[in-house]
Image (tube, rainbow, N blue to C red):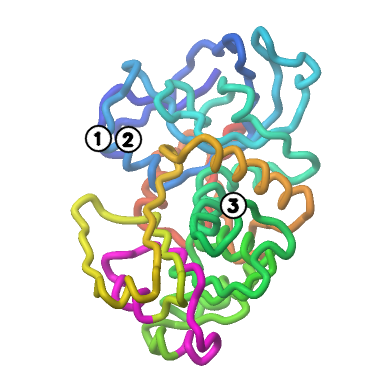
Amino acid sequence: MRAIEYTETGGPEVLKLVDTQIPEPAPGQVRVKVSLSGVNPTDWKARAATPVPEGIQVPHQDGAGIIDAVGQGVDAGRVGERVWIWEAAFQRRWGTAAEFTVVPAAQAVPLGDASFELGAALGIPFLTAHRCLTLGENVPERLGPGTLQDRVVLVQGGAGAVGNAAIQLARWADATVIATVSSPAKAELAAAAGADHVIDYRNEDVVAGLRKIAPRGADVVVEVALAQNAATDADLLASHGTVASYGADPDETFALPVRAQMTLNSQWHFVLVYTMPARPKELAVADVSAAVAAGAVRVGEQAGLPLHVLPLASTAEAQLAVQNSTVGKVLVDVTA
């Protein structure tokens, strides 16, 4: 089969297109014939700095395809099932940038009739967004219609992949969703995703704008740039509000007005989907699947998430596009 591999850390040039043996599913695993592979920031960051655990690494955590074989202990009836994949490459050799991958059965989730484009875009962004929306003591641990009714959610960076997922999931849960963006073009994307209100932070005061819409403040802030936005978030939080931060450079720090946050009984959380506790991750997978089945989440320009699809041989270019903050979702077509 064709696959992308790397044997050492470094820049995009370490990624090589190779012809290698099709892996066999171990007990408890399924093998998936991959159609599309989703690219996330953690993919290029791992390639650049994380030691290769087995000496050879096929990159990418997310993807979509069809189960074509199962290991011992897995229901043979799953063969032929259309699935979306999450965390394929975390501490394992076989990511989704290959014609076939093997993953634990629970990490190949039924996709139903939804598109492979949507399936490959779920994984890391949607599980991260779910975690950010359900961490606070003033919000439920599950998402679904009505679960965030009467809550105000601020999504900082509403045109990014996680921001887009957070907007869509929060709207599905009936929250009032406010998104911040850096340009009119990104404002259109956040609105297409379902944001009720969009604030261009380069031209508007975020705190004043949010307080005009929601005088008591935001119940949840989904935060992409905490080091830059901490003071703003502190000024706009509602009582018992939660800030959930999922993005940062390695050496970033931030400061808070401690007494004021004590008065609010606010909560500040940090989210990395790979090291989430098992139960919240299971609930996130279940809720994201339910949103897919309900037709509540979408991809593409009309959903505020433009798609950029490159062939397998251009995986290095795909990772570089993500590294350069290309707006939208970058996918690798493993069949091309």
Q: Residue at x 51, y 92 (%)?
A: 212
**What's the distance in space between the residues labelled 1 and 3, CA to CA?**
39 Å
Q: Residue at x 43, y 76 (%)?
A: 237
Q: Let me know if residue 301 appears in the view.
A: no
Kindly report which numbered mark, 3 or 2, lies closer to the viewer in this rendering. Answer: 3
Task: Check disc 3 and give the amino acid type.
Answer: Glu
Q: Is residue 161 left or right of residue 56?
A: right
Placement of 269 over or under 37, stated as above or below: below
Is 219 covered by the magenta stretch?
yes
Camera-side residue: 211 or 6?
Answer: 211
Give the x, y percent position of residue 147.
68, 62
| Mark toward the start of the polypeptide (1 vs 2) | 1
Residue 141, labelled with which disc? 3
Q: Which residue is mark 1?
A: 10
| Mark toward the start of the polypeptide (1 vs 3) | 1
Placement of 161 over or under 38, stated as above or below: below
Find out whether the residues at labels 1 and 3 contact each other: C-beta distance under 8 Å. no
Residue 65 location, quadrant: top right
Find out whether the residues at labels 1 and 2 contact each other: C-beta distance under 8 Å. yes
Element carrying mark 3: loop
Residue 161, labelled with which disc? none
